[in-house]
């Protein structure tokens, strides 16, 4: 069991497999973003070694992210290796879904249990505008492939951006009427790279909820959380609606997470710049015990919460370089 100094049990690791991506979502990174050389990223054996070390310290839940995790070479083998790591009971992935039509079945067979797929609109033109060049149909086929492969429950992530897709919350929410999917609306958070969009064009969870309720009536809730998402339901719907309001209603007191970036750096708060490099010591010959002590020290010193209210924006990385 690994606890921080505030008594929070930290047992959920998000591993970014790469900072590379096949899209350029306007709220995530600039169109001319450059990426790290592969040699700077954790190699397959290094990822598996870190998964084992974290599992030995009591981490039982891993989510793979990026960048876009599915563009990583050997993704199926990496998933298989992590799924077979003793102590890991939950293995999931956040993806834009574009490559799932061919990868969903092999990933499920390798031990992936759940996916969250990002889709911000059901309008092909707006999808292209939001992602710079993505094809909506490809993401949609990815969602269907994930469902077919049993990567359920299907959770869809949508970031709402003023001037781009505010009206699309209705169509997205309406998906839950017939489908037992969870549609999660994520408040845009600020990082490096596209900070102006992220701070000037944010749509709050309360604004999104008001739009949805205007169309479908008051949302039902039993005050349940699913991870960081506050869960609601349109009356009579099959699926659920979640609000992840990290900016306006932070969930820091209940945070159980750590993040390992693709370049092997441990980040204990998504929205704080403080980082602990694990990959360089590993490559310089640190023992497993040294690395365990570094991880325990980082966990102990996990920040209480973010400082957005005080204007403290983390500017040392863009979102794709951390892992959402
Ligand atoms: N490429 C994958 C994807 O898009 O799902 C995984 C990585 S992406 C960084 C993880 C999640 O972060 C996605 O759901 C994405 O929509 C979300 N995201 C990206 N930039 C964000 C921002 N500035 N604020 C809030 N969420 C963001
Ligand atoms: Fe790529 Fe995901 Fe960032 Fe979009 S949100 S640019 S798909 S990493």
Image (tube, rainbow, N blue to C red):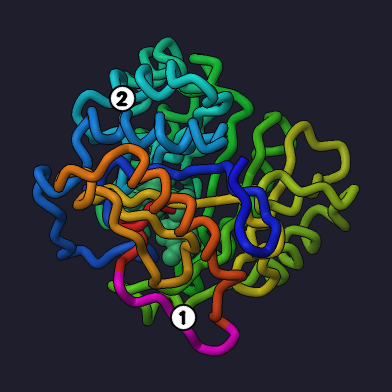
The residue carrying pointer 1 sits among few (fewer than 14), some (14 to 19) or many (20 or more) residues within 10 Å by Cα, namely: some
**Residue 305 image point, x, y percent:** 60, 71
**Residue 232 image point, x, y percent:** 79, 49
Res. 2 in view:
yes
Residue 248's place in the image compared with 119, above or below, is below
Using residue 52 as the reference point, say whether residue 43 is left or right of it.
left
Residue at the image point whose x is 68% and y is 55% from the top: 8
Q: Distance between the residues labelled 1 and 2?
A: 35 Å
Mark 1 or 2: in front is: 2
Quadrant hosting residue 318: bottom left
Q: Is the magenta stretch mostly helix, strand or loop?
A: loop
Q: Name the residue under label 1.
A: 199
Residue 128's place in the image compared with 18, above or below, is below
4 or 200, which is in the foreground?
A: 4
**Residue 315 image point, x, y percent:** 34, 77
307 or 211, which is in the foreground?
A: 307
Res. 128 in view:
no
Residue at the extreme bottom of the image, as rendered: 310
Residue 283's place in the image compared with 178, above or below, is below
Classify mark 1: helix, strand or loop: helix
Residue at the image point whose x is 59% and y is 85% from the top: 309
Q: Give the range drawn in magenta.
A: 309-316
Using residue 149 as the reference point, say whether residue 226 is left or right of it.
right
Check the picture and name the quadrant holding the N terminus.
top right
Q: Mark 2 points at which residue?
A: 78
Residue at the image point whose x is 29% and y is 19% from the top: 77
Q: Are marks 1 and 2 in contact (CB under 8 Å)?
A: no
Residue 170's place in the image compared with 27, above or below, is above
Residue at the image point whose x is 40% and y is 75% from the top: 314
Whether the magenta-drawn stretch holds residue 73 is answered as no
Residue at the extreme top of the image, as rendered: 109
Classify mark 2: helix, strand or loop: helix
């Amino acid at each position: 069991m690994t606890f921080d100094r505030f008594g929070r049990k930290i047992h959920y690791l998000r591993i970014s497999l790469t900072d590379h991506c096949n899209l350029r979502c306007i709220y995530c990174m600039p169109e001319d973003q450059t990426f790290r050389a592969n040699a700077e990223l954790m190699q397959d054996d290094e990822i598996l070694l870190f998964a084992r070390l974290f599992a030995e310290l009591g981490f039982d839940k891993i989510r793979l992210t990026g960048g876009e995790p599915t563009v990583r070479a050997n993704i199926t083998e990496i998933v298989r290796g992590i799924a077979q790591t003793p102590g890991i009971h939950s293995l999931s992935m956040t993806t834009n879904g574009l490559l799932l039509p061919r990868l969903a079945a092999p990933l499920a067979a390798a031990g992936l249990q759940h996916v969250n797929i990002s889709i911000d609109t059901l309008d092909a033109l707006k999808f292209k505008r939001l992602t710079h060049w993505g094809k909506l149909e490809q993401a949609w086929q990815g969602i269907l492939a994930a469902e077919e492969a049993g990567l359920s429950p299907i959770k869809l992530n949508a970031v709402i951006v003023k001037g781009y897709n505010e009206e699309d919350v209705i169509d997205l929410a309406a998906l839950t009427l017939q489908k037992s999917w969870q549609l999660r609306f994520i408040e845009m958070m600020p990082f490096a790279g596209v900070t102006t969009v992220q701070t000037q064009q944010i749509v709050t969870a309360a604004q999104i909820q008001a739009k949805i309720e205007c169309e479908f009536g008051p949302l039902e809730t039993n005050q349940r959380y699913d991870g960081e998402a506050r869960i609601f339901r349109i009356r009579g719907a099959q699926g659920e609606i979640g609000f992840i309001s990290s900016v306006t209603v932070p969930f820091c007191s209940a945070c159980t997470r750590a993040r390992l970036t693709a370049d092997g750096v441990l980040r204990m708060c998504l929205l704080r710049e403080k980082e602990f490099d694990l990959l360089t010591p590993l490559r310089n010959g640190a023992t497993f015990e040294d690395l365990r002590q570094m991880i325990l020290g980082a966990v102990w010193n996990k920040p209480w919460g973010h400082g957005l209210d005080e204007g403290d924006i983390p500017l040392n990385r863009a979102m794709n370089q951390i892992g959402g």
